[in-house]
């Protein structure tokens, strides 16, 4: 490999967002190189953990709904092409006090975008879905099309589909730096070689800020922990995908999320901003501990008591948070040939199929037909 070899586009990071970006660029007939510092897929960053929630009811902001609608279509297309079960529909519950953002924001999104949904009391949720034990006066939005995406299958599917279209994917190759070339392209230097391209996509998760000065302080890694607990034997069926919707729950202990049993013999949950630990992605405690477990077991015992059996698995990952917890999807101010996807703040993976399309748009055209104004870098100026 010499620096005279040129690609149309280079993608740095072949996780959830990067694998989708490589696919969408290759789908357009471009000569694409994807570079991943670890394995494809791997467990070092933000794109693992077996299940990731997808939901049309979007309490964070109604503006996300068109993007998640596109993501649903693209996940279904990827599943059809690859034969991989990348998306599972279980229904979704967004619950909390009536005036809380999780319930009120989900209801608002459904109403503004005409999404079919039901408004239920906590008591009604408990009756319909016996795995739940919510306060009876809580309110919930139930949306039948919610569910989960399988991140590892999604990454492999996008990577295989990109390769089938001619993309070159290289794992175990760390990007050290990049620079603009005299003709307006980019030169990327790794620990194995040098590559040149017309455009660049930075989708390196918790490491993206190390590759773009414009992201300093705007894409901050945070340690996150997850737990899987074994439900009681006579309650197992209450936690299977066909009878247990994915959920977001706002309670006095914080904001939590969880899943039915899938691939691990346990009920899975996590807490947003688990213990509020900002970290260096290259130097933090990746091993989950008893304190991590206690945070998640306490909430399970209170709101899903029949699932609070023996621990089956503990895991850590990373959020990468923006100051307002909305995404960053833009080109770099001084480098219009460089597209960046960052700051997904713990709620981005469900969008990966569509974000790949957006980042391909930005890399090729400098703009996207998707409405991404709220994700621009200049909102932080």
Image (spheres, rainbow, N blue to C red):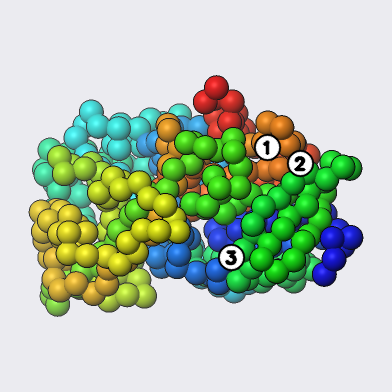
Judged from the image, the secondary structure of the residue bearing numbered disc 1 is strand
Judged from the image, the secondary structure of the residue bearing numbered disc 3 is loop
Q: Which mark is residue 37?
A: 3
Residue nearer the viewer, 233 or 341: 341
User: Which part of the image, by quadrant, shows the N terminus?
Assistant: bottom right
Dot 3, crowdedness within 10 Å: few (<14), some or many (≥20)?
some
Residue 117 percent coordinates (x, y): 37, 42
The CA span between labels 2 and 3 is 22 Å
Q: Is residue 94 above or below residue 299?
A: above
Residue 272 percent coordinates (x, y): 30, 47
Residue 235 percent coordinates (x, y): 16, 71
Q: Nearer the viewer, mark 1 or mark 3?
A: 3
Q: Earlier in the sequence, mark 2 or mark 3?
A: 3
Q: Identify residue for label 2.
A: 337
Q: Is residue 299 above or below residue 327?
A: below
Q: Which mark is residue 51?
A: none
Q: Identify residue for label 1.
A: 331
Dot 1, crowdedness within 10 Å: few (<14), some or many (≥20)?
many
Quadrant of res 61? top left
- Kindly tell me whether residue 248 is visible in this rendering: no
Q: Are marks 1 and 2 in contact (CB under 8 Å)?
A: yes
Quadrant of res 28? bottom right
In the image: residue 198, left or right of residue 46: right
Q: Earlier in the sequence, mark 1 or mark 2?
A: 1
Q: Nearer the viewer, mark 2 or mark 3?
A: 3
The CA span between labels 1 and 2 is 7 Å
């Amino acid at each position: 490999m010499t620096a005279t070899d040129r690609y149309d586009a280079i993608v740095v990071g072949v996780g959830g967002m990067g694998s989708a970006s490589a696919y969408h660029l290759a789908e357009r007939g471009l000569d694409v190189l994807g570079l991943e510092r670890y394995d494809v897929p791997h467990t070092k960053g933000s794109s693992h953990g077996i299940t990731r929630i997808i939901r049309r009811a979007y309490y964070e902001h109604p503006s996300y709904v068109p993007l998640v609608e596109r993501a649903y279509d693209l996940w279904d297309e990827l599943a059809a092409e690859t034969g991989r079960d990348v998306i599972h529909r279980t229904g979704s519950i967004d619950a909390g006090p009536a005036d809380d953002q999780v319930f009120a924001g989900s209801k608002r999104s459904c109403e503004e975008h005409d999404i079919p949904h039901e408004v239920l009391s906590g008591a009604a949720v408990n009756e319909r879905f016996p795995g739940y034990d919510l306060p009876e006066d809580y309110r919930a939005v139930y949306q039948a099309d919610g569910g989960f995406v399988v991140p590892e299958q999604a990454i492999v599917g996008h990577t295989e589909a990109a390769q089938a279209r001619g993309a070159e994917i290289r794992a175990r190759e760390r990007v050290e730096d990049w620079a603009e070339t005299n003709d307006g392209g980019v030169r990327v230097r790794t620990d194995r070689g040098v590559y040149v391209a017309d455009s660049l996509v930075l989708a390196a998760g918790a490491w993206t800020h190390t590759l773009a000065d414009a992201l300093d302080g705007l894409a901050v890694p945070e340690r996150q922990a997850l737990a899987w607990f074994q439900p009681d034997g006579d309650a197992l069926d209450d936690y299977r995908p066909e009878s247990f919707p994915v959920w977001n729950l706002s309670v006095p202990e914080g904001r939590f999320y969880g899943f039915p049993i899938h691939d691990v013999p346990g009920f899975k949950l996590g807490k947003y901003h688990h213990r509020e630990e900002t970290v260096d992605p290259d130097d933090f405690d990746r091993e989950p501990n008893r304190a991590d477990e206690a945070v998640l077991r306490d909430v399970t015992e209170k709101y899903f008591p029949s699932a609070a059996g023996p621990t089956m698995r503990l895991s850590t990952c990373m959020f990468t948070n923006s100051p307002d917890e909305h995404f960053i999807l833009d080109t770099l101010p001084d480098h219009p040939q460089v597209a960046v996807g960052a700051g997904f703040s713990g709620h981005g993976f469900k969008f990966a199929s569509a974000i790949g399309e957006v980042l391909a748009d930005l890399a090729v055209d400098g703009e996207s037909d998707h409405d991404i104004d709220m994700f621009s870098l200049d909102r932080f100026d």
